Image (tube, rainbow, N blue to C red):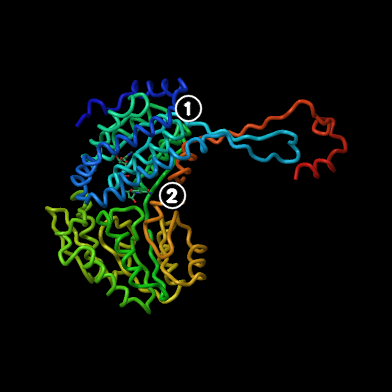
Amino acid sequence: MTMSSSLFSPPALQAMRQFYNSGVTKDHAFRKQQLLTLKKIIIQYEQEIYKALYTDLKRSKEETYATENGLLLAEINTALKNLHKWMCPRRTATNLVNLPSSSVIHYEPLGVVFIIAPWNYPLQLLLVPLAGAIAAGNCAVLKPSELAPATAEIIDKIVTEAFAPEYVKVIQGEGAEVVPQMISSFRFDHIFYTGSIPVGRSIYQMAAQELVPVTLELGGKSPAIIEADADINTSARRIVLGKFVNAGQTCIAPDYVLVHQHVYEKFIAALKHTLRQFYGSDPRQSDDYGRIINERRFNTLVQYLEEGDIVTGGETDREGLYIAPTVLTNIIPDAAIMQEEIFGPILPILPFSNAEEALAVINKNPDPLSLYVFTSDRSKEAFWIRNIRFGSGCINNAVWQFANHHIPFGGIGNSGKGAYHGKHSFLILSHAKPVMKTPVWFDPSIKYPPFGRKMKWFKRLIR
Ligand code: NAD
């Protein structure tokens, strides 16, 4: 590990503050150049990135490209294409009482931002926010997850090679140790955290001490709903892909599926067929099927296998950190698998006979990060969208909303706070600074005391 360059040191953070204060990062030309540098180096290190993701998560190159470096490049390209437009001060309307003033919103960087990422998509969850931070004109400190060490190492190498240490810096180490140290000894201007709910809560508390604003991209239990009128085979394919990509270790994966009882058997048959089609009769041999990140997670996941009937899958190999793609039915009441985020390749299927029954299950874990509804009926789409509070979702699809940089991605309530991707990354890491300019040639006395009988005019002008 190149730990020497990436250990936490307060003077290194002070140097970043000074660099930010110099104003260099605010220029359009500077931001554009840094985005181009990031793009170039991500392309240059493509093979090393694949190697690192294979080491950490046994991912195929195709899966890595679609979910990590390819997705990152799309975000950088979007920022490059739109940077000038995003940065331009935006003229906006002025209300009657303030006329003839004019109003403009300026987008200003926040300063030195701290980006903390988890291990499941360890490259893009750190570097997509970085692209947003660069576009918005900030300096950034990056904390990769220690649980994906090969990826942390390649990120450290890339960042050290691409950027001056006072502009973008990687800090490695145990999160529980190094993150509190950093937050307590340096006032960041924003913390952008992706990870679990308990750690997110603790970071929010630490940030509150200094009133540091936060973005929290958290997890939760994201339901999929299969209505009786859904296209069953297509739904099964899309759910299998969304659930079993990265061996189920995806924050927006369908955590469990609620299936209308009329199509329950048919859906389970379609799942079994699709799993075989995608990963063969022994998924262990498939190049397209990943592994569990570590033994601790493996142990938690194998316990879930006891909590229902295994319809397909269920094979495990502790040494290889392998758990077969598994479908569970007849889940025991109050099972842990229906209370905790599964975050692994085990898919509980629950039948429902009416919407109230399905809603009751979902409401046991409120504010899911995502919701996926499979139906051919528009009124059912509308019902689920209106009646469940969720971060982002799809109709007749799963997880792909994450890869659409035209829409914001984020959670709500328990699943997070704030959203990013595309222009939203720029916005969340900028301060929208409104300025109203008022000419001096018009200064009506109605605005000044003595107010006397001006109420009638106030009512007309102000409301
Ligand atoms: P985690 O919270 O354990 O770790 C995330 C980061 O926090 C790591 O960099 C780690 O070093 C640091 N950290 C760990 N303990 C800490 C502590 N006590 N104080 C400060 N920092 C600490 O999360 P994880 O297990 O790596 O990731 C899995 C979770 O992340 C799941 O819940 C998943 O749903 C969620 N997630 C959310 C998104 C999203 O976009 N909303 C994306 C991926 C993962």
- Circle 1 Cα neighbour tier, 10 Å, few/some/many (<14 / 14–19 / ≥20): many
Q: Secondary structure at mark 1?
A: helix
Closer to the camera: disc 1 or disc 2? 1
Q: Quadrant of the C terminus?
A: top right
Q: Position of residue 334 (x, y in %)?
A: 33, 65
Residue type, label 1? Lys
> In screen coordinates, is 69 left or right of 423?
left
Residue type, label 2? Phe
Q: Is mark 2 within 8 Å of ligand 1?
A: yes
Return the residue at label 1: 26
Q: Secondary structure at mark 2?
A: strand
Q: Of marks 1 and 2, which one's residue comes earlier in the chain?
A: 1
> Which of these two is toward me, 68 or 8?
68
Q: Is residue 344 above or below residue 358?
A: above
Q: Is residue 336 above or below residue 35?
A: below
Q: Quadrant of the N terminus?
A: top left
Q: Mark number for residue 409?
A: 2
Residue at mark 1 to residue at mark 2: CA–CA distance: 25 Å
Q: Is residue 296 visible?
A: no
